[in-house]
Amino acid sequence: MAQPENKPLVNVAKGIKSDTYPIWFLRQAGRYLPEYREIRAQMSFLELCRDPKKAAEVTIQPLKRFDLDAAIIFSDILIPPAHMGQTLTFGKGHGPLLTPHIRSSNDLAHLKHPDVEKEMGYVGDAITETKAQLGPNQTMIGFAGAPFTVASYMIEGSGSKTYSEVKKLMYQEPETFSSLLDMLAEVTSEYLSMQVKAGAEVLMLFDSWAGNLSSSDYSKYVLPSLIKLVEASSKNGVPLIYYSGQGSTNLSKLADLPVQVLAIDWRVSLSEAASLVGSHKTVNAFQGNLDPIILSWGDEALVREKVREVLDEAKKAQIKGHIFNVGHGVLPTTSPDAIKWAIDEIRNYKA
Ligand code: CP3
């Protein structure tokens, strides 16, 4: 008979105690690894995302080096807009660019709802390919951007400091704005289901730019489509992690968001986050929240001290479960040794 599943990340996300502390790092695959740079020298980032075998290979790279509990599929939150009628490019020296911009109801009318299985099936194939290479206790994570954060890129066409165009559409054409978010919620819901069918055991939604809104605007303009998406993805039967980037403004608004894990950055401590969220019906765990820059510039003693600080905070917060992670993506300047020290500190932590 097959052994019962014992996956620390899945267990903690479901509210089941685990003897092993679940550990993974946002952007654990990427440019800080020489073996990743070697593959990137031969193909572009998007070619890599669209090649299931190569995407699986880079997804697994960090798991070969480090004692990690999960793999997150190598892809990007801007893949869906690239199938909805926008052109996505990643140039040298700048972040992603999406054209044409979506800034009116006329622009919105030109977007299409893609055939997710057919056009984006390569992401599912990469998940299936990766999962076959995981150890028995390792978890396969699928992901997507949350509607507001993806819409921000679609409207601005790139990252932004002020989100001026996003807020312009939001305030001047609220119906267009909410139709765009609802359309993204529908496409993303199908996209996440496809990932679960392909083998994803946990899903993560990235709302990296949600912290740019006041908490009342967040409730009014962002939460409705987000709740629709989260409710639809609950039907997949796998735990959902929601990441609200850039601080604490929205944490107090999340009491009714039916997710199992809340991921936070380092701008609030785990105990502050837990008290801001307050009582919550579905959250079993918090994920985070080491400042990733420490893994670039900290010496061994500092890395270990800062990791212990996060673990002590998790204990103090009296949260049901904690998944160790960084509060935002691992940076290209990260030292692979620092990741080793961090993991070693967690594995030997005596609470
Ligand atoms: O975590 C992982 O290992 C999985 C892969 C992953 C990537 N992007 C790969 C990537 C994930 C989960 C993402 C999510 C993502 N993408 C977010 C949400 C998380 C966050 O960072 O807030 C956002 C906002 C994006 C959009 C994006 N993609 C930006 C702004 C950039 C450029 C910045 C940069 O680091 O160069 C990307 C490119 C990107 N996505 C890279 C990787 C590994 C770098 C590509 C390369 O040149 O090799």
Image: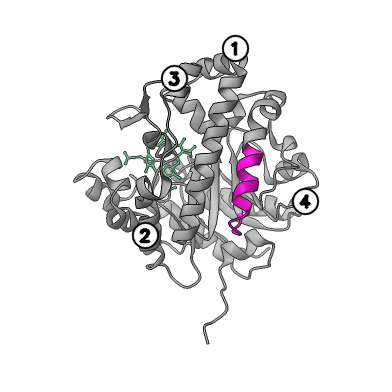
**Highlighted magenta segment, given as a residue range:** 226-239
Q: Residues within 10 Å of mark 3 (few under 14, many from 20)?
A: few
**Sequence-wise, which precedes: disc 1 or disc 3?**
3
Q: Amino acid at mark 1?
A: Gln
Q: Amino acid at mark 2?
A: Ile
Q: Which label sits in the foreground, 4 or 2?
A: 4
Residue that numbered label 4 is attached to? 281
Magenta: main secondary structure equals: helix
In the picture, the disc for residue 172 is: 1
Q: Are marks 1 and 2 in contact (CB under 8 Å)?
A: no
Q: Residue 94: x and y, percent?
A: 33, 27
Q: Residue at x 44, y 52 (%)?
A: 338
Q: Up-down: is 91 above or below 41?
A: above
Asked which quadrant contains residue 10, the reply is bottom right
In the picture, the disc for residue 60 is: 2
**Sequence-wise, which precedes: disc 4 or disc 1?**
1
Q: Amino acid at mark 4?
A: Lys
Q: Which label sits in the foreground, 4 or 3?
A: 3
Nearest the eye: 166 or 12: 166
Q: Which label sits in the foreground, 4 or 1?
A: 1
Q: Residue at x 25, y 40 (%)?
A: 44
Q: Residue 235: x and y, percent?
A: 62, 55
Question: In the structure shown, which secondary structural element does the residue marked by tag 4 occupy?
Answer: loop
Label 3 to label 2, Cα distance in Å? Answer: 39 Å
**Sequence-wise, which precedes: disc 4 or disc 3?**
3
Q: Residues within 10 Å of mark 2 (few under 14, many from 20)?
A: many
In the picture, the disc for residue 99 is: none
**Sequence-wise, which precedes: disc 1 or disc 2?**
2
